[in-house]
Image (cartoon, rainbow, N blue to C red):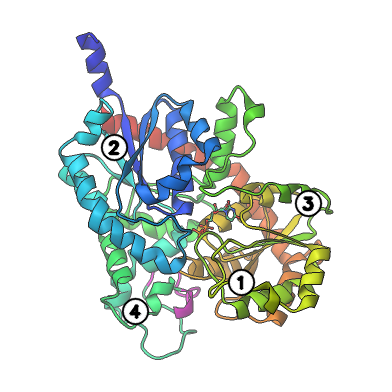
Amino acid sequence: MDQSNQQNKTLEPHVLVFPIPFQGPVNCALKLAELLCLSGICVTFLNTEHIHRPLLRHTQVLSRFSRYPNFKFETVPDGLEHEKPVSGDGFMEVMAAVDAVSKPLFREMMVSGSLSRKSDRPVTVMIPDACFSFAVDIAIEASVPVICFETVSPCCLWTSYLNLPTLIEAGDVPFKGNDLDQFIKSVPGTEHIIRRRDLASFCRTNDLSDPVIKLIVKEAHSVPRTQGLILNTFEELDSLILKHMRKLCPNIYTIGPLHTLHKTQVTANTTKQSEETTFSNSVWKEDRTCLNWLDKHDPKTVIYVSIGSLATMTVEQLLEIWYGVVNSVKPFLWVRRPGSITGGYDESKVPPELLERTKEIGCIVEWAPQEDVLAHPAIGGFLTHSGWNSTIESIAEGVPMVCWPYFVDQQVNSRFVEEVWKMGVDMKDTCDRLRVEKAVRDIMDSKHNVFTQHARTWESLAKESISKTGSSSNHVGRLIDDILAMSS
Ligand code: UDP
């Protein structure tokens, strides 16, 4: 290689994307990485080993990324032996493993430059998950500009992450007493919306030394130190809180709904479009047969039930939701992820009438192509755990929701779905068959219900935001320009 080539190479923008090792964040980060690749930026995608193993078997994702010469995967050990569908309970186990094993190795990679040497060019910008505050510290130590990517919802980021030090100072966290319906006055912008029960689940602790609280407090302090913050939302959806958030983090890129923006841009740049069957980067294998089952149903008649990749339910909760859904008399597509029933699933304990009705009107799969499911015309409602990806995927398709939040941001998201976006029912902290049945009917019955109307409005605003001149497209363009400028 002659010297001028060498010089050109070292000036090349090279982004290191480093997601937290869970299904949803990795899926999102891959989409962001692909958008950067399309613009010609070199991307190294760093996974911890435990989440990378199942991805290695996902040939569709691997083959899609193999067509980008400017993309490569790297891994960093995390010491986690087992490949398991981690449940919510395992969240801190994974984060503790990353802290103990991956963090020092990552520091070594960045500070000694071994990662840069491996790829023949230095990392010019780092995009870690906002939860990895250690990565922000290391980027600053290595003099690399850092832009955080936060994959939890902006409403949670604002109310329960960035304001956690304020909540603690105001005495709102930990909760004193049991009045979960008391409104939280210390967070600007949501004084009349957010009650104690709507804060992120970790706020329900009595113990400020809880490792999750410590992790989030660190994030609250580190995010404002970065050069920017990327959020999977669009301006209109979160205008209520973005204006407050920008006082703390002025440089925010709202690039959502990321999955539809990604799909649009990848499609526009792909010549062999017929080869593209899914745009999902789902780490687990999707059962696409459910799409054929959906094809047999009339528009807006099916309720889709899924609690995402981490949430679990007890057998009692399973039966309550199951009865509620069956009694609503809507055909249903239900994702039953292996390991998602605490204590295990024993079909012999399920009342025979439920199994019979399920044969007639239900379809159960272990993992679905959710983005395609939500976009299917037969889907009329989504009973969800209110994970942020699921929520924004539902918003993007105008599908009203019944929300049954499990943990972290889901408590905030479900509140916003009901109170702010008015496109669903929040069943937080309850689980009985009558409530489920009523909620499913409420969101799906009658074409002119308010939930459907609001859902359509949000769907069209979401579509507008990813159009050529839409706000999210503009923010992606600005992000790319800023990465180029930071790399020069
Ligand atoms: N998902 C999927 N198939 C399923 C269930 C979920 O592909 O059967 C995807 C879904 O589209 C979403 C992600 O898994 O992108 C779940 O992310 P979310 O933030 O909603 O919840 P989490 O799994 O992180 O709790």
Instruction: Report if the CB atoms under discs 1 and 3 are less than 8 Å apart.
Output: no
* Badge 1 density bin: few <14, some 14–19, many ≥20, Cα 10 Å: some
Mark 3–mark 2 distance (CA, rounded to whole Å): 45 Å
Q: Residue tagged by mark 4?
A: 173
- Give the mark nearer the N terminus: 3 vs 2: 2
Which quadrant of the figure has residue 399? Answer: bottom right
- Give the mark nearer the N terminus: 4 vs 1: 4
Q: Residue tagged by mark 3?
A: 293
- Give the mark nearer the N terminus: 1 vs 2: 2
Mark 2–mark 4 distance (CA, rounded to whole Å): 35 Å
Q: Residue at x 47, y 84 (%)?
A: 180
Mark 4–mark 3 distance (CA, rounded to whole Å): 47 Å
| Magenta segment boundaries in residue numbering | 187-198
Q: Residue tagged by mark 2?
A: 125
**1 or 3: mark nearer the eye:** 1
Mark 1–mark 3 distance (CA, rounded to whole Å): 24 Å
Q: What element carries label 4?
A: loop
Nearer to the camera, 78 or 447: 78
**Is there any visible trace of residue 466 in the rendered image?**
no
- Give the mark nearer the N terminus: 2 vs 4: 2
**Is there any visible trace of residue 447 in the rendered image?**
yes
Q: Residue tagged by mark 1?
A: 345
Q: Is mark 1 on a helix, strand or loop?
A: loop
Nearer to the camera, 408 or 176: 408
Q: In which quarter of the image is ligand 1?
A: bottom right
